Image (cartoon, rainbow, N blue to C red):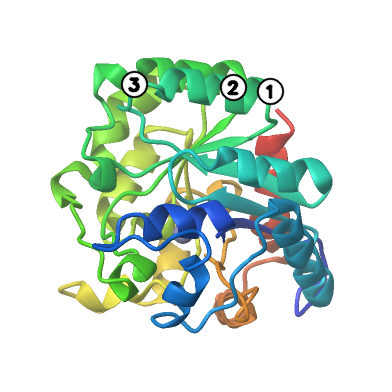
Amino acid sequence: MQTPFGEMPVIDAHAHFFSYRFFATLAAELPEPPSEVELYPTLRKRIPWEFPEADPVDLGKQWVAEMNRHGISRMVLIASVPRDEESVAAAAQAYPDRIIAYFLLNPISDDAPARITRAFAELGVRGVCLFPAMHRFHLWDQRLLPIYETAAAHGGIVFVHCGYLKVGIREKLGLPSRFEMRFANPVDLHGVAKAFPNLPFVIPHFGCGYFRELLLLADQCSNIYTDTSSSNDWVHLMPYPLDLKTLFAKSLQVLGPERILFGTDSSFFPRGWRKDIFDAQVEVLEALQVPAPQVTQMFSGNIARLLAR
Ligand SMILES: [Zn+2]
């Protein structure tokens, strides 16, 4: 991709795969769950989005076309409800050079160890996504040991959404949130990160409200990464002024350019890939006069290195 820093590959390390099964799973939580034929008509009344075909390879094809349109090399696409890893895996198998599959797992569900083993060993999934506030577990919980062990054994990546959590589509559908922030502190990862020093943990959105904790943790553990994705609107909740420029500057100082992964948090169509997020980050990196080799690390080199392990 042509950027103000020159021509460089861009890999988006954080985007969502909103499959047919994703929407069907959420709709099943509605007070009056729609039948299969009523699924999209029901959702369309509340959300003005495009909804994907039942075959996840079609959605994969749509994302590949979107990448081509913007000059993006590859994307991490996250299956974003539990038990949907097969959807994104099918898309990644159809486009192995373009789509990197991650999946959301409730690690304290009975089938979690079997699911993660199958995902990594058979489906070609590369990352497991944990949402402690959503599924209400602590990251240090002993029940998660097999999850970390399996991810480590397969050279996987553990993506951990800490901090402030709102899921926009749940709100649009009026679905209740059972999220509990007491599980969301990145500091919960300290012992785990030390116990699995070769397993990379990615805490998205600069810690999403727990920026200080992210920095403290990352200073202690070299396997802690962050991603730059989303609008990072959470900065407005801080008791002191904080903006994207400060987030980048301080992260570059503490984590270094080799532990910062570029991401957008793109998710649905017709909005597609969030060029606005990319442009805002490029602008900040220009203002900070970050050297091009460091920008390349953040925009593609780091995630490529983690995937090549
Ligand atoms: Zn996200």
Task: Residue 209: give x, y in percent of width and height.
Answer: 27, 61
69 relative position to 304: left or right = right
Q: Which residue is mark 3?
A: 110
Classify residue 77 as left or right of residue 45: right
Give the number of the disc on residue 118.
Answer: 2
Q: Residues within 10 Å of mark 3 (few under 14, many from 20)?
A: few
- Please tell me which residue lies in front, 228 or 149: 149
Q: Which residue is the site of mark 1?
A: 122
* Left-right relation of 121 to 158: right
Q: Give the mark, 3 or 2, whose residue is nearer the N terminus.
A: 3
Crowd band around label 2 with a 10 angstrom C-alpha radius: few (<14), some (14–19), many (20+) = some
Kind of residue at badge 3: Asp
Marks 3 and 1 sit apart, C-alpha to C-alpha, by 19 Å
Q: SS of the residue at dot 3?
A: loop
Q: Nearer the viewer, residue 69 or 59?
A: 59
Is the residue 272 above or below the residue 205 in the image? below
**Contact? badges 1 and 2 (CB < 8 Å):** yes
